[in-house]
Image (cartoon, rainbow, N blue to C red):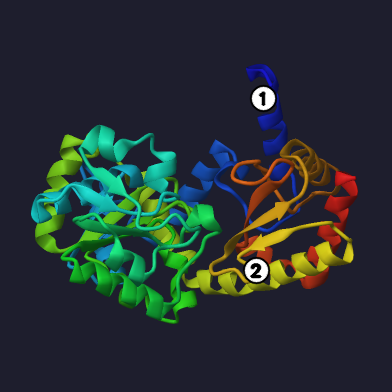
């Protein structure tokens, strides 16, 4: 597909999603620039005094956001970063200096390994090793028995590329204990940690307390424009601020992103448990509809979602499924699925990510079944 055709298809998809009357969630591109700016101006007064001076190099509303995150996660301090990629490089670099070990153990499907162009090694001089290659987080035994030393264990909660998977609480505590017994620090890649508390049945701060440091994202689940935070001990966060400056992350003004993060904490964070609960309803209804339609093979991963997101696999080419999903959006105003991808599966199979958020709470089991049947009818 040439660049012109690809751009035309992208615009067509955006138009279809923006025009949909029913969706399981609304993505960041589903609203125009003007709509987002208008909404921010209307809502900002909920989390700040509009008469305040905008932030300068991290004070004001950015500092308030840091205080709020530190309190929610139960850490002494938190540091705001423009991106999670930068936040995690800084975190692991700080810990490497303290442990005198630049080796980080993490999953080969973790975000830094798959989606950051080898940044840990190329930029921060860190080396990565993998206690397991199974499509799940490592077990305590795998951490204990791993043949190489490492200074830090990084756990992505949930492990997105494996299906937004989480361990059970006892499994997670045992893995952390195993790392501690090897004198390794534990860092949580918690880009989506906000929605994990329901699965563990523990308050957010209790989950975060297992780790020495935690990174969280503001746009992945909370709907902010951008931004991330790193939380941990005061002395480590002081060093993190120095490295943030060196990495180019001390931005002159960031109040639009910070305000949307605060709004996300106020509005979306309390609703995440309801999204997680309803994702289970949506997933079960999808599975029933696929079975009733006689689909030759399908997989929901995991079958019962651990968070408000999960994977769906079908035995068709991604281009075919993507075309059917787009036609359904355009012709009916109902968007069930978005992008389909061939990666990671056998030839002729494709995967999509499903997210259930505010708009998805309106969907009944019958609505899901009807949408699945409409989609499959267009697959042919």
- Tell me, for residue 303, which label it has, or none: 2
Assign a secondary structure to mark 1: helix
Residue 251 in sight in this render: no
| Left or right: 324 in relation to 259 | right
- Density class for disc 1 (Cα within 10 Å; few <14, some 14-19, many ≥20) is few
Q: Quadrant of the N terminus?
A: top right
Q: Residue at x 34, y 54 (%)?
A: 106
In x, y percent, where is residue 260?
A: 42, 52
Please state which of the two labelled residues, at mark 1 or mark 2, is closer to the viewer: 2
Q: Residue at x 52, y 70 (%)?
A: 271
Assign a secondary structure to mark 2: loop
| Left or right: 23 in relation to 46 | right
| Left or right: 123 in relation to 303 | left
Residue 307 in sight in this render: yes
In x, y percent, where is residue 187?
A: 27, 60
Front in this rendered view, residue 188 or 132: 132
- Tell me, for residue 6, which label it has, or none: 1
Q: CA distance from mark 1 to mark 2?
A: 33 Å
In x, y percent, where is residue 228?
A: 34, 51
Whether residue 163 is situated above or below residue 121 in the rendered picture: below
In x, y percent, where is residue 5?
A: 70, 21
């Amino acid at each position: 597909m040439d660049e012109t055709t690809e751009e035309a298809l992208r615009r067509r998809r955006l138009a279809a999603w923006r025009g949909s009357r029913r969706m399981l969630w609304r993505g960041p591109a589903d609203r125009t620039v003007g709509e987002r700016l208008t909404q921010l101006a209307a809502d900002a007064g909920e989390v700040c005094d509009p008469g305040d001076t905008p932030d300068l190099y991290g004070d004001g509303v950015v500092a308030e956001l840091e205080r709020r995150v530190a309190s929610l996660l139960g850490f002494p301090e938190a540091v705001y970063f423009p991106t999670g990629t930068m936040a995690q490089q800084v975190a692991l670099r700080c810990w490497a200096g303290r442990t005198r070990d630049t080796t980080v153990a993490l999953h080969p499907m973790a975000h830094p390994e798959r989606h950051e162009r080898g940044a840990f090694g190329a930029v921060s001089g860190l080396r990565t090793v993998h206690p397991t290659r199974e499509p799940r987080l490592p077990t305590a035994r795998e951490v204990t028995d791993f043949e190489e030393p490492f200074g830090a264990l990084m756990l992505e909660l949930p492990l997105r590329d494996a299906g937004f998977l989480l361990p059970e609480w006892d499994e997670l505590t045992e893995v952390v204990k195993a790392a501690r017994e090897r004198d390794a620090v534990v860092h949580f890649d918690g880009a989506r940690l906000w929605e994990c508390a329901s699965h563990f049945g523990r308050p957010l701060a209790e989950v975060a307390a297992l780790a020495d440091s935690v990174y969280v994202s503001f746009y992945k689940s909370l709907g902010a424009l951008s931004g991330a935070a790193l939380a941990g001990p005061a002395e480590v966060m002081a060093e993190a601020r120095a490295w943030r400056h060196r990495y180019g992350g001390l931005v002159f003004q960031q109040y639009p992103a910070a305000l949307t993060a605060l709004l996300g904490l106020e509005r979306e964070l309390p609703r995440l448990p309801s999204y997680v609960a309803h994702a289970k309803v949506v997933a079960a209804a999808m599975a029933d509809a696929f079975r009733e339609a006689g689909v030759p093979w399908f997989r929901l991963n995991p079958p019962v979602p651990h968070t408000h997101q999960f994977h769906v696999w079908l035995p068709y080419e991604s281009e075919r499924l993507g075309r059917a999903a787009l036609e359904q959006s355009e012709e009916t105003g109902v968007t069930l699925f978005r992008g389909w991808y061939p990666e990671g599966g056998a030839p002729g199979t494709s995967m999509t990510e499903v997210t259930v958020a505010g708009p998805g709470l309106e969907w009944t089991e019958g609505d899901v079944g009807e949408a699945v049947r409409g989609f499959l009818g267009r697959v042919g």
